């Protein structure tokens, strides 16, 4: 058997090398992953792909899943072997037939090789009996769900796992009788026999492999209408206080999003069914499978005490996944180097739908807070990446994801829409969607279409915004003659790297005692003189980027601080908050201690909930990462008092809750501990605040991570948790919060095994407590091992896990020792994966800045 396998593999290599000398598509070599050359070859020779899949799923998650696959396709050339992707043990395949003939199972470097002697030009049929791989089945005790993005369908069944080989699917699921399921297509019929039942699904629409999906298990089934579509909804939530208000809201948000997108695109909902499933501890916020959208359950089910931020996040999430039905599902990128296209459109269209619902001012504030801080957090670092990145192999596609494509790209798209005009932009996008419907396209395809709708040179504009990384540093020079402005000049230069210009438009607002003067600026060169400012009276102060849509590190007029909390518009205050924070990080104009004082003074005065959240987050970062340990101990009591007093003064219950959370985050004093302990013990929230079971769980963990005197806190809180999924999550996190160093050591050591990292959201929650600032004296020893695990995490985890692992690990470190571990690791691994190196630099940028600041203090 071994000898025969080696002979067949030798023939594959010979045939591949020989055929590459002939005319026609270049035949790729056999290598791990799905290379660009393999994808191009298969796209050239394959059409009319259809998968018939039958899976027999047992109730026990440790038992194998018997599977039968029929793969049909048309082949234009049979000169060479055809690679079918299957990243699994070939021993799981028990029978392979090609066009009615039994064929040998020839498997090499994650590919099942279909030998040309069995293939034919035209229609082909491959039948495979096998045990399904578990790599992307996400099996739990009583439910499972597939998650195949970007190239993980091949870990479950043999397939052509690339986005531009769209196919149809006919799925059959054999399940325990008390399970329910959802898939891309409509349910054809259900057959029940004794303890088992079978779901037969109709043939699906055309889908890329990463969009093929199903979920099955012990779920509740709800049915409703979204816009004009019948919808099925599976969920496992058990808390009536969340279910009752959430169900109607979930349907209403989907309905509004569907209607907006149908109207804006001019294309009716493009798939045969609409449905969604809420999954406990889901890895992402959501995933846009047509007919079977997956959501993180905690993001959908909110109780009466939900904050505006939580409600906005739910709206954004649902609108985002709904937008994907057109942007990503109907028209799909042809290669994952353009994965950002579907994400930017999903985010941007979700934002646009909110603009229509919430009004211009609320939209602008929400857009600013949602996108700019997150984009800056990456783009200011030495690891910053362009929006569009090259990709040689799909096995590395997960490294493309991050805040640049989710947050800088929507800012870029907003600038593009302003540049073209809303109507021309919409016309171009509609043309793109209709031209490439049920097919694939690239960013250059879209740019060419948009270019035909505007006189602006989009190719030139595209180069700096899309193909290069980084942001501009904006500065200004103002000259007065008496009490009049003589000249106001704005300049820009690259923060990092070669000098270049970011063409963009923004506003500058001059504030006077009785009026404001708004000046529109088009900065398309390195320097711009605002001629409209010449001759104007000297203002009290100037606010740059006052509309909140310009991108870069913005200057701050020193006088802004004096008037900051008196600014009438919440948008103006948010612009100033963000600009001041960015100036602080760059070591300009304001130091961390001064900014912490300034922001804490505004907590009682700031009435806009989104701004309260923004300030609270900035205060937490400055307090934990940019304040020395001794300094933190000195200022903690005063900061606690400011937060508590501000909470009492706030009129909005949501603002009160946000400040209560901030107090819970930073407290150190015994007095603060006693307040919070009594609230937790009695389960009586402060007046005007509603706390849920989840909130009390978070409070228990906050007390425990400070080695609270009551060692029964965690066991008692565990007994209070009613939902079995949330109970399992809490049980997983508990060892990471333990007061015993040995227990925490054992927990970290357990993460070396992929099985213990399977529930990624739980791992990330645990890492926050494991590396909490109050535990870092001991947890610093985990940092080097955490970096060493990164490459394996990238190979075995889902797309966001490497970046999230780094952020949860390094997020609040500030010491020179921690910074040294990062420097030494990179120095000792000069040939390290460049994309993972960039992720490290992104996640540790604040650490490097904090360490430099600490070094300067000590001199």
Image: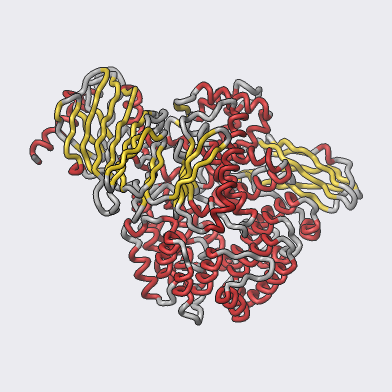
Residue 100 is situated, as x and y percent measured from the top left of the image, at 17, 25
Q: From the image, which quarter does the C terminus lie in?
A: bottom right
Q: Quadrant of residue 472?
A: top right
In-image side of 790 versus 310 (left or right) = left
Q: From the image, which quarter does the N terminus lie in?
A: top left
Report how many numbered discs are placed on residues in the image.
0
Residue at 18%, 30% (x, y): give it: 97
Would you say residue 144 is visible in this rendering? no
Q: Nearer the viewer, residue 747 or 726?
A: 726
In-image side of 441 versus 687 (left or right) = left
Q: Quadrant of residue 685?
A: bottom right
Q: How is the image coloured?
A: secondary structure
In-image side of 635 versus 399 (left or right) = right
Q: Is residue 623 above or below residue 41?
A: below
Q: Is residue 123 above or below residue 36?
A: above
Would you say residue 145 is visible in this rendering? yes
Q: Is residue 757 above or below residue 43?
A: below
Residue at 49%, 55% (x, y): give it: 843
Q: Residue furthest front?
A: 194
Residue 2 is situated, as x and y percent measured from the top left of the image, at 10, 41
Residue at 72%, 68% (x, y): give it: 646
Residue 741 is situated, as x and y percent measured from the top left of the image, at 40, 75
Q: Nearer the viewer, residue 233 or 717?
A: 233
Residue 135 is situated, as x and y percent measured from the top left of the image, at 31, 47
């Amino acid at each position: 058997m071994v000898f025969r396998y080696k002979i067949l593999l030798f023939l594959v290599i010979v045939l591949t090398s020989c055929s590459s000398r002939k005319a026609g598509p270049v035949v790729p070599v056999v290598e791990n992953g799905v290379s660009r050359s393999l994808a191009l070859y298969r796209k050239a020779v394959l059409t009319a792909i259809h998968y018939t899949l039958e899976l027999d799923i047992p109730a026990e998650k440790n038992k194998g899943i018997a599977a039968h696959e029929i793969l049909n396709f048309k082949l234009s050339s049979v000169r060479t072997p055809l690679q079918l992707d299957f990243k699994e043990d070939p021993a799981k395949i028990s029978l392979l037939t090609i066009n009615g003939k039994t064929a040998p199972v020839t498997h090499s470097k994650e590919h099942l090789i279909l030998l040309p002697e069995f293939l034919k030009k035209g229609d082909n049929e491959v039948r495979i009996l096998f045990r399904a791989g578990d790599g992307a089945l996400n099996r739990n005790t009583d439910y499972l769900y597939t998650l195949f993005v970007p190239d993980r369908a091949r870990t479950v069944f043999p397939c052509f796992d690339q986005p531009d080989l769209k196919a149809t699917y006919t799925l059959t699921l054999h399940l325990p009788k008390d399970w329910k399921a959802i898939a891309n297509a409509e349910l054809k019929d259900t057959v029940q026999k004794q303890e088992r039942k079978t779901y037969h699904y109709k043939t699906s629409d055309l889908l890329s492999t990463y969009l093929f999906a199903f979920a099955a298990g012990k779920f509740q089934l709800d049915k409703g209408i979204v816009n004009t579509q019948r919808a099925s909804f599976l969920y496992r939530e058990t808390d009536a206080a969340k279910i009752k208000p959430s169900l109607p809201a979930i349907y209403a948000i989907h309905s509004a999003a569907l209607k907006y997108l149908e109207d804006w695109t001019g294309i009716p909902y493009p798939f045969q069914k609409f449905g969604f499933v809420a999954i406990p501890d889901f890895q992402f916020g959501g995933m846009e499978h047509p007919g079977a959208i997956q959501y993180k359950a905690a993001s959908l089910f909110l109780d009466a005490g939900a904050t505006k931020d939580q409600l906005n996040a739910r709206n954004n999430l649902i609108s985002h996944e709904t937008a994907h039905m057109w942007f990503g599902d109907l028209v799909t990128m042809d290669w994952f180097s353009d994965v950002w296209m579907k994400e930017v459109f999903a985010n941007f269209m979700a934002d646009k739908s909110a603009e229509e619902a919430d009004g211009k001012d609320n939209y602008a504030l929400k857009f600013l807070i949602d996108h700019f801080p997150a984009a800056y957090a990456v783009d200011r670092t030495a690891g910053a990446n362009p929006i569009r990145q090259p990709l040689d192999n799909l096995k590395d596609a997960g490294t493309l994801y991050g805040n640049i494509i989710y947050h800088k790209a929507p800012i870029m798209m907003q600038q593009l829409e302003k540049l073209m005009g809303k109507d021309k932009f919409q016309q171009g996008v509609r043309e793109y969607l209709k031209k490439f419907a049920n097919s694939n396209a690239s960013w250059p395809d879209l740019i060419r279409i948009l270019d035909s709708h505007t006189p602006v040179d989009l190719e030139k504009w595209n180069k700096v915004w899309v193909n290069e990384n980084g942001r501009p540093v904006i500065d200004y020079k103002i000259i007065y003659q008496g009490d009049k402005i003589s000249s106001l000049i704005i300049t820009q230069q690259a923060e990092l790297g070669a000098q270049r210009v970011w063409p963009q438009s923004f506003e500058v607002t001059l504030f006077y005692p009785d009026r404001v003067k708004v000046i529109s600026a088009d900065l398309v060169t390195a320097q711009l003189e605002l001629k409209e400012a010449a001759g104007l009276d000297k203002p009290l102060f100037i606010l740059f980027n006052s509309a909140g849509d310009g991108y870069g590190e913005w200057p701050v007029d020193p006088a802004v601080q004096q008037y900051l909390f008196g600014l009438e518009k919440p948008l103006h205050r948010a612009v100033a908050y963000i600009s001041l924070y960015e100036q602080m990080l760059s070591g300009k104009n304001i130091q961390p201690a001064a900014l912490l004082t300034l922001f804490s003074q505004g907590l009682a005065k700031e009435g806009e909930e989104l701004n309260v959240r923004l300030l609270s987050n900035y205060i937490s970062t400055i307090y934990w990462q940019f304040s020395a340990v001794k300094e933190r101990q000195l200022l903690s009591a005063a900061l606690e008092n400011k937060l508590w007093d501000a909470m009492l003064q706030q009129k909005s219950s949501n603002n009160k809750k946000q400040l209560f959370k901030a107090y819970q985050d930073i407290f150190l004093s015994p007095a603060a501990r006693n307040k919070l302990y009594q609230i937790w013990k009695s389960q009586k929230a402060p007046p005007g605040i509603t706390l849920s079971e989840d909130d009390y769980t978070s409070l228990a963990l906050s007390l425990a991570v400070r080695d609270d005197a009551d060692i029964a806190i965690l066991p008692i809180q565990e007994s209070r948790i009613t939902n079995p999924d949330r109970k399992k999550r809490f049980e997983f996190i508990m060892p990471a919060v333990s007061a015993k160093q040995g227990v925490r050591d054992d927990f970290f050591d357990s993460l070396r095994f992929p099985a213990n990292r399977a529930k990624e959201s739980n791992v990330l929650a645990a890492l926050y407590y494991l590396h909490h600032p109050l535990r870092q004296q001991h947890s610093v020893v985990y940092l080097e091992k955490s970096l060493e695990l990164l490459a394996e995490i990238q190979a075995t985890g889902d797309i966001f896990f490497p970046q999230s692992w780094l952020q949860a690990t390094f997020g609040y470190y500030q010491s020179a020792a921690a910074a040294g571990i990062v420097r030494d690791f990179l120095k000792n691994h000069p040939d390290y994966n460049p994309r993972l190196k960039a992720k490290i630099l992104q996640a540790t940028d604040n650490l490097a800045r904090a360490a430099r600041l600490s070094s300067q203090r000590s001199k």
